[in-house]
Amino acid sequence: MKWLKFTCSLVVLIFVVITGNSRLPIGNNKALPPLGKFCDPFHGFWANGESKTQTTLSLPALKDEVTVVWDEREIPHIFAKNERDVSIAQGYLTAKYRLWQMDFLARVASGRLCEVVGNRAKKLDEENRRIGLTFAAERTVAALEEKAPQVKKLLDAYCEGVNAYINSLSYEDYPVECKVLDYKPELWSPLKTFLVQKYMAKSLSYRSEDREMNNIIAAYDRKTMENLFPLKNSTSPIIPSGTEWAFTPHGIKDDKNARNTNKIYDIPFPNRPDMIKGSNNWAVSGKKTLSGRPMLSNDPHLKLFMPAIWLEMQLSSPEVNVYGVTIPGLPGIVIGFNENVAWGMTNSVWDVIDWYKIKYKSDKKDFYRFDDKWLPTTKRREVIKIRGEEDYVFDVVYTHHGPVSFDEPVPIALRWTAHDPSLEFKAFYILNRAKNYDDYRKALTYYDSPAQNIVFADVNGDIAITPNGKFPIKPDGFGRMLEDGTTSSTEWKAYVPYEHRPHIKNPESGFVSSANQHPTDDTYPYYYNGRFEYYRNVRINERLAKMQNITIKEFNSLLNDNYNVHASTVLPTLLKMVKGDDADSKSAIEILQKWDYNNDPDKIAPSIFYEWWRSLVPAIWDEFRDGKKYTKPGWHRTVEIIVQDPRSKWFDNVTTEKQETLEELAQNTFSGAVKKLSNAHGTLTSENTKWRWGNHRGCDVNHLMRIGAFSRKDLFVGGGRHIVNATRKNAGPSWRMVVELSSPIKAWGVYPGGQSGNPGSKHYDDFIGKWEQGELYELLFLASPQDRQEKCVRKLVIGAE
Amino acid sequence: MGNMIGLFVVCGVAQMFFPWWSMAVAAFIFGFVMVEGKNDFVVFAKGFCGVALLWICVAALQFFTTSQIIATRISDLFSLPHPALCIAVCGVVGGVVAGIATFSGCQLRQAMFD
């Protein structure tokens, strides 16, 4: 009996200990963290508080001592005696701040998220494997190894630093997300660095509407498609109109017969190019500034996440002294400045993706047709290990075009510049060390993908901008829909030579700028397409043209400019079409009439206009309601039709017998929008703060895993889509930077987040308030570890032994 | 009472060097060596209180020194109305495991010797 009692209690004990050490499924694909392990006050989440200040550290990989100085904002300033040691220290500190984020990004890109979160990431994992992100990363590692071994060695050093940190960890030091999900962070590698880079390439350049254009042509005709999605109506291009092109373009023979299409493809095609991502950058010459020195500004607009996308650092050795931000996992500085130059990036939306229909010889998919031959395919076995389930195994077929990303209803191969071996890291290596304009131009020759508009200014007084990347030369109109993959006549055959890429240095206007608009006007000899910006660029160029005696104040005011150019072009026309039918809609009209078109957070008008426009657009483009087949024309084209062609057939709702007019659509959607707002926020009065833009829309910076408790929500900010201050509900200026190329250099910046990736640290989100206010920190660019000691809070000498 | 303080110290030392379940091993041995097994509930309660107290004290110490922010976020994650409740929840989790371990250890001794 006693033994029985003991046995029973022992069984219960073992059960409880095992349970306390494992995740508990709670249904709906969710699980609780292992309770005993997680709650343990010695090693569980309690150990993820503020980190203790490290007073000694040694990294055997170092050649010499490295000194790190931290300023008040937790920015590390790394001073080493050689550039390899800089990389090691950068890797170590990046991992210390952002290990979980790095691990997560590399997992996402390689399609291995299911391993830690279970089958809810299956779709994403499958997509990232089918579009070949790992394939792309592998080729890039090989290219760097072969063509830039010196840069590869620095990357290896960076990985050594990251791994030195990871190897020093025991369970209690793991990032809290690893404890919540109960997994161990993996060692880092050069491949993972490139996976992070390909994650960014996907996020910035994997955008394509070829299927949608194809379907619109099939449903209407090519003329209609070209009319609704015009390519050549740029507003204020990056390279000013009238610039002459001093080169003879390479010609391309066009085989139009190979480009006929008439079939609707109702397939789960890739993500729509989400217009969330954009960016602004500009530089002005010394003749426009108070100091007489050039100034440069950049604010990349990305989906906002916690931990923040960017990590801020200063890296210094006899070879380099650079300050700026990088993405955790990428060595060096991506956007920043050194003692001589400053640079910034905006995304180029120049289309660098095409889709080719593939014809297999048989169901085995071993051969595919190309000209008069059957070429062999290669297959890549993909095994998605899903936590708690069986592995999901499939093959991705590769052709010389690229991976066949979609099999149904027709096999389609992806041709994408991000798959090609490239040397962006060499470009960054040179940019980080650049001394002048020539170095900048040299650096860009190595930069292929994702294409960026790279702005530049230096202490010699030069400013410049280059829309840069690997751009295929295509015949007019090519690549806007699915192409025939069975013939060489539709292939990309050549790329715009570097010297022919749009570029401008020291223009007479005294400034250069970009905001994702057309890189050139219609006179540029090479054909290109993309969904370009029409509004932010106009506002930026207008304001820059007027500005004189510029200081940081003027630049920051432009960064925070809330003027809604789009509303200003369409609202006067729309307002004439509506009447108020109750108290709220009467007040709403009055508010809109008095609006100065600024999307300021404390104004009500932007909330009304936003909701109105949001319901008007789908009402107009009801023809393209089916988002699986079609996409809607852009705002700029929609406004053109509203203002110039108010009797257009597009205003009719095709599902009703009646002939609708623009006036009816405007009135209905206006009443609907006001009603929606009244229902949500109550009666419209100037005291009812819920109607205000900063409250109605606001901004949420969500945690990467969308863990609400690790997010910062309801920030009271203005701005909006197609506005210079491009803040949106979940996206916006992810880093704002201004640099004055004086001696010494002055710089300012802020990003929404904080240096630490640990939700238990006060440095997790300590920049958010400043960002929300639209203010900038003065950046501390140190000449030596002894410089400006009053601004520094601690110092660590990392030993080499 | 003295027993419980013994358990508190032994488990505390074990957990400084070993993972969380080391306290279950310690509580088992403690139950085997130290606890009289007259009343099952008292045996369980001794183990429970010793480790619950340990976990509460250490968690509270963490809370008031470095871990207030993380405890606040975790309590938010699990919809606990107040961050201090995190401390109590952890105490219960540790206490239950230790209570069962102590009970189990005590049963082994009784089976072997009584």
Image (cartoon, helix red, strand yellow):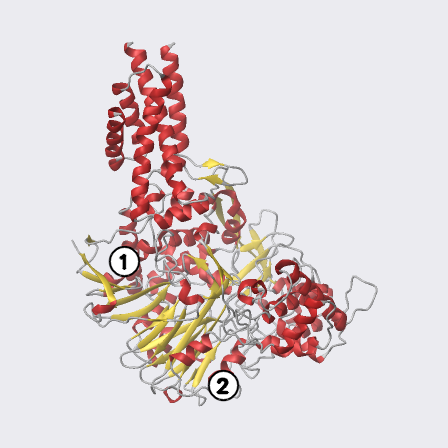
Chain of the residue under label 2: A
Q: What is the C-alpha distance between the residues marked 2 and 1?
A: 43 Å
Q: Three-letter amino acid code at disc 1?
A: Ala
The residue that disc 1 covers is: A157
Q: Secondary structure at mark 2?
A: loop
Along the line of sight, the residue nearer the viewer: A27 or A278: A27
The answer to whether residue A60 of the structure is visible from this angle is no
The residue under the point 27% across, 23% down is B30
Which residue does the numbered mark 2 point to in the structure image? A245
| Residue A435 quadrant | bottom left
- Image quadrant holding the N terminus of chain A, namely top left
**Residue shown at the point (37%, 37%) measured from the top left:** B90
Mark 1 neighbour class, 10 Å CA radius: few under 14, some 14 to 19, many 20 or more? many
Answer with mark 2 or mark 1, whichever residue precedes in sequence. Answer: 1
Left or right? Give the position of A600 relative to A589: left
Percent coordinates x, y for residue A662 in the rendering: 75, 72
Up-down relation of residue A789 to residue A409 (above or below): below
